[in-house]
Image: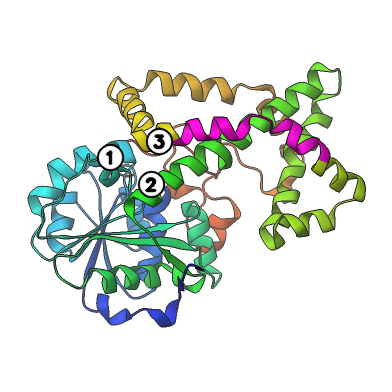
Amino acid sequence: MTARMYYDADTDPKALEGKTVAVIGYGSQGHAHAQNLKESGVDVVVGLAPGSKSRPLAADAGLRVADVADAVREADVVMILVPDTAQKAVYDAEIAPNLRPGQLLMFAHGFNIRFGRIKPGPDVDVGMVAPKGPGHLLRSVYSAGGGVPALFAVEQDASGTARARVLAYALALGSTRAGVLETTFKEETETDLFGEQALLCGGVSALIKAAFETLVEAGYQPELAYFETMHELKLIVDLMYRGGLNFMRFSVSDTAEYGDYVSGPRVAEGVKATMKDVLADIQSGAFANRWIAVQEAGGAEFRELRQRDRAHQIEQVGAELRAQMPFLDPVVVHAGEAQATVGGAAAVESGDGGAATPTQPTPDPTVAG
C-alpha cells in the first residue's frame, strides 16, 4: 500500500489558533522552528537557560525569550529542541515540574521517548514533527516559499486533540507544503539513526575518505582527488535528488553508467551485512547506550573522533580549494559556535544573521540547543 502524504489542505490551522508554542532550544532546529512558526502567525516563546549565548540571537530575530520553566508554564505546546543528550536533564529539571494536563509535548526526533529516557505522565499529549533536513535548510526553504518534508507521529493523545495540533504545527513549520508522512516514535528513531550512520553521514563520509585516500596513496594529486571524490559528489547527488538514480544515470556518460553497474557492487560488497549489524545495534539500544555513556563520561571520545576527522587531509585540501571558489559561499566551522548564527547563503537569504564563517557547527551545549 502506498503511504499517504498529508498536505496543507489536510490540516486545521485553527487547532493552534490562540495557542502559545514554547520552543525549548535555539540551535540548528530551534531557530528554524521558532522563526517559521512566528512568521506563520503562531505565538512563540523561546525557552533558554539564563546564560545561553543564543538568547541575544533569538531576541534579535524578534522572538520573545524566557527561562525554560517560565516558557513551559506559559505554553499550550512545548517543543523540545535541545540536543538529544541534554533533553533528559532539561526535561526533569525544568519541563516536567511545569507541565499541566492537556499540554502537547513535542519532539523533532524520537530518541528520548523511544529509549525511555523521558517518560511523560498520562495526562499530557505527546507528538512529533521531524523535518527531513537540517535547520538552516528548513528555514531557508520556508523563506523561499517552499517546505522541507517531515515525519509526524502521535505517541499519546490524552486530550483527543493531539493529532490535529501536531498537523497544525507541521503546517506552521511549512512542512505540509512539501508533505508529511505519518509514523511512530519507534520507526522514526530507528530509521533516522540508521540513515545517519549507515549512509547519510557515516557511510558517505567513510566512502569519501576511502576514495580520496586510495587516489592519494596511488600517487595522484590531492587536489585532483578532492575534486573527484568530494566536489563532484554534490553534482551527482543533485541529479539523484531531482530524478532518482535513473536520472543520474541518464545524465552521466555511458562509461560512467556502465562503471556504476559493474564496479559499484564490488565497492559495496559486504556492506549490506554490516548495515544490518548497525541496524541491530540501533534497535537493541546498544548504540543509544554507548552514546549516552560517552556523554555522561564527559564526551572525551566524541571530541577525539571529531578532531581526528577535522585534521584529515581531505579537509585541509578542500578548505584551500573552496577558498578560491567564492561562488560556493564556502564556510569554515569552529566548535562551539551557536548554530542559529550559521547557514551560509541560507542564513543571509532568510535573515538568520549569518556569521562570518556560517555553516553547521557544534551545537550549543547549554539549553540553547
Residue 364 located left or right of residue 276: left
- For marks 1 and 3, the one nearer the N-term is 1
Residue 98 located left or right of residue 8: left
Chain part drawn in magenta: 262-279
Eyeballing the image, is 289 above or below 172? above
Residue at the image position 58 percent from the left and 40 percent from the top: 199
In three-dimensional space, the C-alpha distance between marks 2 and 1, rounded to whole angstroms, equals 9 Å
- For marks 2 and 1, the one nearer the N-term is 1
Q: Are marks 3 and 2 in contact (CB under 8 Å)?
A: no
Q: Which residue is mark 3?
A: 282
Q: Position of residue 94 (x, y in %)?
A: 14, 46
Q: Which residue is mark 2?
A: 189
Residue at the image position 56 percent from the left and 62 percent from the top: 349
Q: Are marks 2 and 1 in contact (CB under 8 Å)?
A: yes
Rendering quarter of residue 274: top right
Residue at the image position 52 percent from the left and 51 percent from the top: 354
- SS for tag 1? loop
Q: Position of residue 80 (x, y in %)?
A: 28, 51
Three-letter code for the amino acid on which mark 3 is drawn:
Ile
Q: Which residue is mark 1?
A: 115
In three-dimensional space, the C-alpha distance between marks 3 and 2, rounded to whole angstroms, equals 9 Å
Q: Is residue 232 visible?
A: yes
Q: How many marks?
A: 3
Q: Position of residue 142 (x, y in %)?
A: 50, 67
In three-dimensional space, the C-alpha distance between marks 1 and 3, rounded to whole angstroms, equals 10 Å
